[in-house]
Amino acid sequence: MGSLPTESLSVEEHQQQQVEMDDTSRTERARWLLNSPDPPSIWHELAGSIREAFFPRNKLSSSSRVKQTWRRSAFSFLRGLFPILNWGRNYKASKFKSDLMAGLTLASLSIPQSIGYANLAKLDPQYGLYTSVIPPLIYALMGSSREIAIGPVAVVSMLLSALMQNVQDPAADPVAYRKLVFTVTFFAGVFQSVFGLFRLGFLVDFLSHAAIVGFMAGAAIVIGLQQLKGLLGISHFTNKTDVVSVLGSVFSSLHHSYWYPLNFVLGCSFLIFLLIARFIGRRNKKLFWLPAIAPLLSVILSTLIVYLTKADKHGVKIVKHIKGGLNPSSAHQLQLTGPHLGQTAKIGLISAVVALTEAIAVGRSFASIKGYHLDGNKEMVAMGFMNIVGSLTSCYVATGSFSRTAVNFSAGCQTVVSNIVMAITVLLSLELFTSLLYYTPIAILASIILSALPGLIDINEAINIYKVDKLDFLACIGAFLGVLFASVEIGLLAAVTISFAKILLNAVRPGIELQGRLPRTDTYGDISQFPMAIKTPGILTIRINSALFCFANANFIRERIMRWVTEEQDELEETTKRTIQAVIIDMSNSMNIDTSGILVLEELHKN
């Protein structure tokens, strides 16, 4: 019995110690909350972004990191900048055999397509071939995608010609036009590099997936209509890109007999051959090489036909002279001063965003198939340096091509060595075989471009977008109709505007849910979604589904809460003669609140 006071005392001491510990921990938490350290400065964050882009994370302990020498740091920097140093040490002859076959197959498709895309960009044919030499070599050193095929593409070529001819007419002064194209390529490379170095890839994401689907489809139709000039052998053709102007120019030429039927017969014959080869290659995966080699076969056969029949004397338009040899330097041709500097920088920015969007989408889709991750920021740096060097070596904007990447993947490529093989093959063609392409008909280049366009139109994806999100579908249709009936700039502007409007709509009118407890659980859910949820009498529970509680949506949230409070109050007074005792606001989804949001909460608390 005498031990009872001692035991009760020990219990009281234990409780007292527990209270003191709670007070201490509460004081400690308050000290950290009230005296939290300052966030890192903007310059510290920028330096961290560059460091993360080039220096791969080291798995060594902190003490081991301290002991690292400058040589190891330098090698770490080089490995971050040139991924080839990582996988090149384990490269085997068996992989080279696969890459060699894939590279040769890729070159057979790249040579005729590059000539056609240069024509689409209003440049001489050799500049398309130049763009298939230097940029792939640079990307092979700095890029991390194993399957992507680098070179000129239809959409960027059309984008350049559509935007640049408003600055300089290529027919009036082709030399000045070419210089401005090289300048645009330089600016595109600079913007892409900056996006990657400072981890600004989110800027590219403003072109949403739905907008890209619509833009690509509209661009494909515009490109296809523009190829009617080469397919029909039309001499007088409009410089505008909208469908009304192009069709008007075609009908006017047909009416006044400004076209030559032999071009149409030759082009359509080989277009049918290319489409059949494409169909067979899709049906039988083992014959993947057939649609890849069909464009080169078309060029060879059509050139022989024109040469043997002297069809160029009867109205068939031909390529004529293609300048051969290595890429000449174009550093002295860059127009970094003068009246057109602002316009070329703007076009460079647009080209950079469109090229990056296509390349990263292509690279990530095939990386997911192979089961590895693609770092978007490193890809931007690689693309940027690739285009900067390209602008100095007579190339225009290059990016990843979906059709050629699909061929590269089907051909069994293992690494980016297939791009190196392709570039060397195109270089040898420039040195040895350009004179043989003198009689290549323009109609064949048009048919090659036309045969590649169906892959840009994805009707099934547009239908899927419509089913999933109507606002996304509106962005898709806006981009499609803008490119088709106005211009490339209007199409892109419409897509970005609708995407921004969607973001603003979600920010200004966030989801606000009236919560109720689900029967026989401790879980709360939206009453409109779960009608069986039970409301607690006198207590209103509301969830705000918005990461931002700011000036844009604060008044909307206040009005919605006050309306629910009024309605609930009236309902309680009619049924139980009680009043609302408390309003519980679940803000677990809110990550940020500004002064407007704080004022609204204070006003709600007073009310």
Image: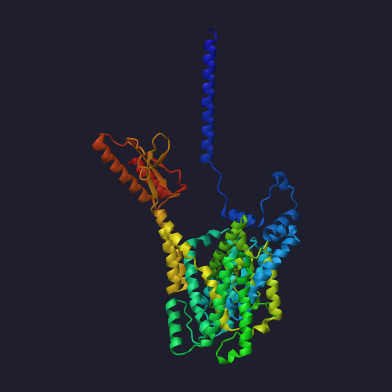
* Residue at image coords 65%, 78%: 332
Residue 102 location, quadrant: bottom right
Point out the residue furthest to the bottom here.
Answer: 313
Q: Position of residue 218 (x, y in %)?
A: 47, 70
Colour pattern of the rendering: rainbow
Residue at image location 66% in from the left, 51% down from the top: 57
Q: Is residue 190 above or below residue 559?
A: below
From this viewpoint, is residue 100 visible?
A: yes
For this rendering, which residue is in front, 577 or 444?
Answer: 444
Left or right: where 90 falls relative to 385? right
Q: Position of residue 409 (x, y in %)?
A: 63, 63
Residue 503 horizontal side relative to residue 155, left or right:
left
Question: For the view shown, which residue lies furthest in the left direction?
Answer: 574
Camera-side residue: 283 or 20? 283
Residue 585 vertical placement versus 152 (above, below): above
Give the residue at x 72% y 44%.
63
| The C terminus sits in image quarter | top left
In the image, residue 316 lies at what x, y percent?
Answer: 56, 88
Q: Position of residue 429 (x, y in %)?
A: 69, 78
User: Seen in the image, is 469 located left or right of residue 88?
Assistant: left
Q: Is residue 230 above or below residue 410?
A: below
Q: Could you tell me if residue 389 is visible in this image?
A: no
